[in-house]
Image: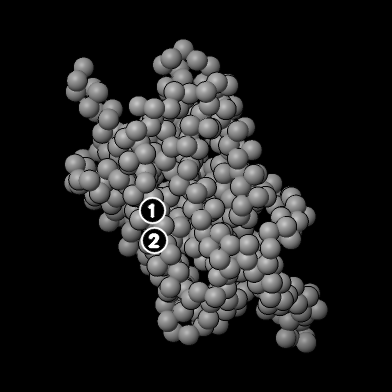
């Protein structure tokens, strides 16, 4: 019995620590979206400079973090979903009722996050896609992986066709002999508007709160459109998380040699593909249309490969340093990931938006990493002492209480 409890504890520590690394890693890319106009996330040409050092900072984020930490977070959401379902069934509860109540409240949190705090919310997306992922909870791991890879490939193909068609049409803009020249000029004109939108964003986010809120209310359809646009990325990742939880990969149950094999199988080709896509963007002069194609479609395969390799390497690190205070703090940050995620949005928008300190658009790409490191330190410093006294993070407690319809015991 004691060994069973130890195995369960080790499993949860591995999942929590992975989630901690993911929620910290997400900030390494989100920091650009907090501090600069939206398109700066995709292209340094939009904002943040085109000097060699600016491009190097962009390239570092694109290679190491862009989409990989979000991918890991999505995989872990699928795993956590199964963990909650298993617990509900073990306690004789209706797993569907438990799951859909949690997703309903998560969706509400996500909409509040989007409208009142920051436009880059993923909680509503996770809630919506999580409702669909629930239908696959009983599938065996091999079937989940096959369907996940198939859906992911379909998503890449569809986005490649859509944005690639725009790129193909735009390439005819300067060819007077082409029948597509006029359509190409129209596509180019639409993307040329980005520079004006950057100027508008700078004015908006350097100003007071109410105009920002008004702009978000005018864009109320965006969270729903975001679900449709990223469904075929997020759902496959959640399905992979479900499969990798069931087969023991995410819980640290595999042999160390197997994790090393996975890492070495997928990291080199993932890095190579990501470098190729980054080079294509640089070669185009960071053309906006090329950047959107890269962000939405071309980078997808490399991101997935690197995400799986990162998971394997992090699990090896967690197992090797499981007794260290550092991993304990990262695991605590993972247990309070919901609070850390929303708390980061509150802190960063207060630092950068005009109703706070007002640094929006005034901090260079390299300097932004100092803010990122500072927020990581905050996550690591508060999470463990809090959990030494309380059962849940503050927002985790609120979410759990709302989903269960009664206040949960908070103190240890």
Q: Residue furthest top?
A: 92
The residue located at (24%, 28%) in the rendering is 7
Asked whether residue 27 is in view, the answer is: yes
Question: Where is residue 152 shown, x and y percent of the image?
Answer: 52, 49
Circles 2 and 1 in contact, beta carbons < 8 Å: yes
- Residue that label 1 marks: 378
Left or right for 33, reference 372: right
Left or right for 389, reference 317: right
- Give the camera-side residue of 20 and 139: 20
Disc number for residue 215? none
Question: Where is residue 389 shown, x and y percent of the image?
Answer: 34, 33
Up-down relation of residue 219 to residue 3 (above or below): below
Disc number for residue 374? 2
The residue located at (51%, 29%) in the rendering is 400
Mark 2, other Cα within 10 Å: few <14 / some 14–19 / many ≥20: few
Quarter of the image where one finds residue 240: top left
The residue located at (39%, 27%) in the rendering is 411
Question: Where is residue 136 shown, x and y percent of the image?
Answer: 52, 30
């Amino acid at each position: 019995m004691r060994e069973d409890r130890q195995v369960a504890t080790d499993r949860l520590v591995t999942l929590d620590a992975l989630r901690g690394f993911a929620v910290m890693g997400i900030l390494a890319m989100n920091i650009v979206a907090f501090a600069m106009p939206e398109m700066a996330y995709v292209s340094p040409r939009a904002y943040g400079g085109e000097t060699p050092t600016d491009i190097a900072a962009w390239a570092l984020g694109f290679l190491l973090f862009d989409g990989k930490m979000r991918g890991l977070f999505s995989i872990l959401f699928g795993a956590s979903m199964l963990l909650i379902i298993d617990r509900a069934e073990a306690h004789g509860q209706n797993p569907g009722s438990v799951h859909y109540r949690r997703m309903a409240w998560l969706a509400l949190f996500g909409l509040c996050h989007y409208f009142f705090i920051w436009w880059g919310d993923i909680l509503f997306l996770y809630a919506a896609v999580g409702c669909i992922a629930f239908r696959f909870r009983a599938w065996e791991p091999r079937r989940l992986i096959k369907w996940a890879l198939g859906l992911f490939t379909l998503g890449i193909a569809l986005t490649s066709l859509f944005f690639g068609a725009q790129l193909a049409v735009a390439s005819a803009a300067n060819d007077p002999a082409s029948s597509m020249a006029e359509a190409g000029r129209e596509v180019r004109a639409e993307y040329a508007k980005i520079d004006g939108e950057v100027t508008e964003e700078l004015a908006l986010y350097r100003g007071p709160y109410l105009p920002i809120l008004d702009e978000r209310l005018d864009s109320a359809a965006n969270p729903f459109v975001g679900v449709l646009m990223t469904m075929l990325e997020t759902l496959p990742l959640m399905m992979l998380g479900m499969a990798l939880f069931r087969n023991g990969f995410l819980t640290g149950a595999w042999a160390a040699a197997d994790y090393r094999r996975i890492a070495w199988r997928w990291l080199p080709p993932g890095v190579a593909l990501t470098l190729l896509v980054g080079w294509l963007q640089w070669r185009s002069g960071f053309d906006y249309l090329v950047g959107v194609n890269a962000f939405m479609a071309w980078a997808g395969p490399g991101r997935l490969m690197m995400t799986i390799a990162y998971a394997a390497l992090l699990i090896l690190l967690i197992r090797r340093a499981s007794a260290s205070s550092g991993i304990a703090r990262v695991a605590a940050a993972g247990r309070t990931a919901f609070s850390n995620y929303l708390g980061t949005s509150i802190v960063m928008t207060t630092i950068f938006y005009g109703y706070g300190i007002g640094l929006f658009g005034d901090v260079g790409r390299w300097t932004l990493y100092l803010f990122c490191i500072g927020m990581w330190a905050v996550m690591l410093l508060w999470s463990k002492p809090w959990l030494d006294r309380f059962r849940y993070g503050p927002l985790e407690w609120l979410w759990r209480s709302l989903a269960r319809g009664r206040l949960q015991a908070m103190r240890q």
